[in-house]
Structure formats: C-alpha cells, structure tokens
Image (cartoon, rainbow, N blue to C red):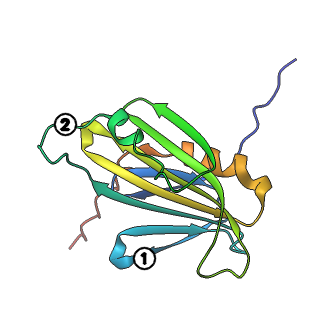
Amino acid sequence: MSSTPEIIPVRIYFHCGWAIQVDPSFESELLYGGETLRMFDPGERREVSLSSMTYRRHDGAPFTAKEVLDTFPPREMSGLRYEHERGTVAGAALWMLGESDDEPEPCWVLMAIMVCPPAGRLARCTIVCKEESDRDWAVDTWRSITRTPPPAQPAPRKAMS
C-alpha cells in the first residue's frame, strides 16, 4: 500500500544570511532600518521577529557556540529552556509568559538565539503567541532557522534592439 506524503506549505524568509520557515499566510515587514524582519499571521495572533548581528570576543579569538549559549538566558529570566543544534548552527530558547508594551494582557514568548561560529554571526529570534498551546509551533519555527543564503535570482534579460 502506497501512501502519499503530506505536503505542508511553508514560506521561507531570508534575512542577513539566515532563513526561517513560517506558514504561507504570514506577511512581513522590516523594522529599525532593516535590522529586524517581523513576520506575522493575518490576525497577528502569532508574530516572529528575526535580527542578525556580528559577534566577536573582546580578545578577537573565535567564539564557540557553547560560550555564547552558556550565557543564555539572562539570569533574571525563567521559563522552559530548549536547545538545538544542526550542522554549524546551534541555539537556545526560553519559553515564558511575558509582558508586552503593545498588549493589555500577558502573552507567551519564545526568546531565542542561534549562533553560527564559522560565520561569526548570531541571530536573535523572538516569537510571540497569544495561546500557550502555540508552544510546539513556536519551538518548531525557531528550530527551522538555518544559516542559508537566499536562492540565486536569475539575471535580468537585456532588451533586444
């Protein structure tokens, strides 16, 4: 008996060498002069923000993923911690009930970082959800982050004269 694989549609956004997968209904906008990519569903019940930064140690030596992830999350924050590693990328995340400047009620937040030591880059990812039941979706979305250049775009055709 042959079974047909289930096709799950996703939209992949690329930002500063990082890629992340979200539902195809998500829209996006760039914030803070292009520093942060914000993706959100039509009702804005789920929101994903992704920022990229260069990371260097004070002494100029290369850093390891362990060095960075051992400092995450900040001591004053508590919640359910997750770790993830795939290829040259590793990360840690914290799921917690948080306050928002924009929302009157607390919301669920997955605050995360991903590191790619060979590229000397970090990605900061914040996922905000209205429902605690969105935790698995938030963790899966965060774990979809890879260090991937965007697909090559075909060169524009020259007009024939």
Left-right relation of 36 to 136: left
Q: Residue furthest right?
A: 1
Q: Secondary structure at mark 2?
A: loop
What is the x, y in percent for residue 62?
Answer: 19, 37
Compare marks 1 and 2 and give the one earlier in the sequence: 1
Q: Which residue is mark 1?
A: 31
Q: Which residue is mark 2?
A: 62
Q: Which residue is depicted at the point 24% across and 44% down?
A: 120
Residue type for callout 2: Pro
Left-right relation of 90 to 157: right
Depth check: give the residue in front, 14 or 116.
116
Q: Which residue is depicted at the point 35% across and 73% down?
A: 34
Q: Which residue is depicted at the point 63% across and 71% down?
A: 99
Picture quarter with the C terminus: bottom left
Q: Residue furthest left?
A: 59
Specify whether residue 97 is in view.
Answer: yes
What is the x, y in percent for residue 101?
Answer: 58, 80
Residue type for callout 1: Leu
